[in-house]
Amino acid sequence: MENPGIASGHPIQSVGMNPPTEPPGTGAVCAPDVDVIVIGTGLAGLTTALELADHRRVLLLDKQELGAGASDKAQGGIAASLDPQGVESHVRDTLIAGAGLCDEAATRFILERGGQAVQWLIAQGVPFTTDRAHGHEYHLGREGGHSCRRIFHVADSTGHTVQSTLVAKVRAHPNIVVWERQMAVDLIVRDGRCVGVYVQEVPAGTVHALAARFVVLANGGAGKVYLYTTNPDCATGDGIAMAWRAGCRIANMEFIQFHPTCLYHPYAKSFLISEAVRGEGGILRLPPSAGEEAGRRFMPDHDARAELAPRDIVARSIDYEMKRLGIDYVHLDVTHLGGEFLQEHFPMIHARCLELGIDIAREPIPVVPAAHYTCGGVVTDVAGHTDVPGLYAVGEVACTGLHGANRLASNSLLECVVVGRALAADILTQAPPAVVAVPEWDDTRVRDSDEEVVISHNWDELRRCMWNYVGIVRSTKRLERAQRRIGMLREEIHDYYAQFHVTRDLLELRNLVDVAALIVASALARRESRGLHYSRDFPQAAGNPAPTVLAPRSSRRGPASPAIPQSPRGMW
């Protein structure tokens, strides 16, 4: 399959390229000894790089700063069990949350290695919160869907602490080269193998062709496709879209997890109130705007597990109450837990809310659901292999089968570490293939844009369309309307891409519209309600659950229609 850059108005000239040691803007000479390019520096990318670096030279790319992204924002922790009995319970909880679509073999592989993953992080220097005062080495949290306490955490800022620890390790490793503010544009595929990647300097705009023996996608999910999200601005589905255009199958994109409790505040629209808050006893109540029902605890009306039900159920229940009563938010009440407890266990949430004028020890927290996690992604096995030789994917960008139709809380960071380590081990067992000459990016046939407003307008229209028509509760009519609008937007955006010099905003919009088309196509293909996908037209789960697998048509500019549904047999 030819690289999309060829047909986008960016003609090419084949040249030999050696992987570089420093960003092109420094004028540094390219070095010949980089073996693997890892795109993305969340927990998945950092783990992969560190596990490779003792034996291979690694180039780490990030369109922002090293370590920035969704992993850094993770509050809850890492779910893991250290004994066989605990693993079985963890597997059972994961399969229940996944609503019949988890790949059990992949689930067992990942969860059985949970203890090793935690020990690896401890060896890197991660200071998990201890509980020796109560006779336990570590304090274990509990979140929705978990039948017991099994979540290792660092207070309520696990992600930031883990990221800071691994970033320091990466910067100190002589075999890891870091390029910050470098955005991957597209993968380069030759003779069926991924041999490199086009990378744009941000904000300079220059695009370079980089060759590699292996390329690893670790650049996260696509939460920014929705108007309201807990995700950082970088979560634009870049890896999913790039892999799709390179010829990879994509699976289960209809399963977008909406976190039930995002803070409702004009100055903190993406601030997450951790699942662990409900795990420690937080209660969801109706706010004063609910009139006579104000203060009523409503979750027991929807599920016997109440606030500890899986995220899909809690988010859908909140959405139902908001629409039923015409209210803008609900309340998460933790006042009964006491200020001392809240400051000890949730210091970051407590402090941030205080900054915004909310004393959570004295008043309830206004919360709403928001797009949080992409459960689907690039089809891989548990070692990160994709359909394209030479290309791997790990973390939220990938779909191993662990999460099924709904991710169990705190399983995602675990997957990043386990699969990242397995991926690195797989690469290390292979004889390194030769670096192939790759086509240089040439934009002599395109021009500077004089209508940047088109990008911002289309960006806003796309995200509003997805929120209004492809949200928590869906219908066939809404999905078909979204598909028509997204189809028109996609044509506009790809035409724009073909005519003008690329910018980060344009590249992210192009990726988002491709991912949006995949989400809608997957949702229309699922004629039932399951896990995170709820349809008014098909409110019940059907028998014989199967993943939704989409296969790209081979084309210079990607598929004319979003996808070809494919039999799920042999998916993993």
Image (cartoon, rainbow, N blue to C red):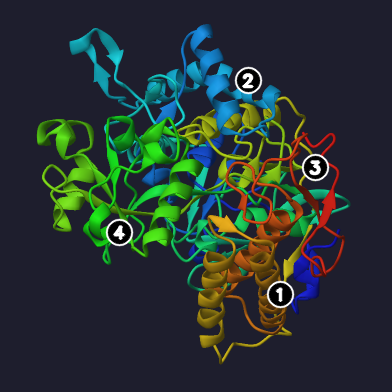
CA gap, disc 3 and disc 4: 44 Å
Q: Residue flagged by tag 3: what amino acid is it?
A: Pro
Q: Residue at x 48, y 44 (%)?
A: 42
For the residue pair 70 and 260, the one nearer the viewer reads as 260
Residue 264: mark in rendering: 4
CA gap, disc 3 and disc 1: 34 Å
Residue 108: mark in rendering: 2
Labels in figure, total: 4
Q: Which residue is mark 1?
A: 484
Asked whether disc 2 touches disc 1, contact meaning CB atoms under 8 Å apart, the reply is no
Pinpoint residue 232: horizontal percent, then vertical percent: 42, 57
Q: Residue flagged by tag 1: what amino acid is it?
A: Arg
Q: Which residue is mark 3?
A: 389
Q: Residue flagged by tag 4: what amino acid is it?
A: Tyr
Residue density around tag 4, few if under 14, some if 14–19, many if 20 or more, within 10 Å: many
Disc 3 versus disc 4: nearer the observer: 4
CA gap, disc 1 and disc 4: 31 Å
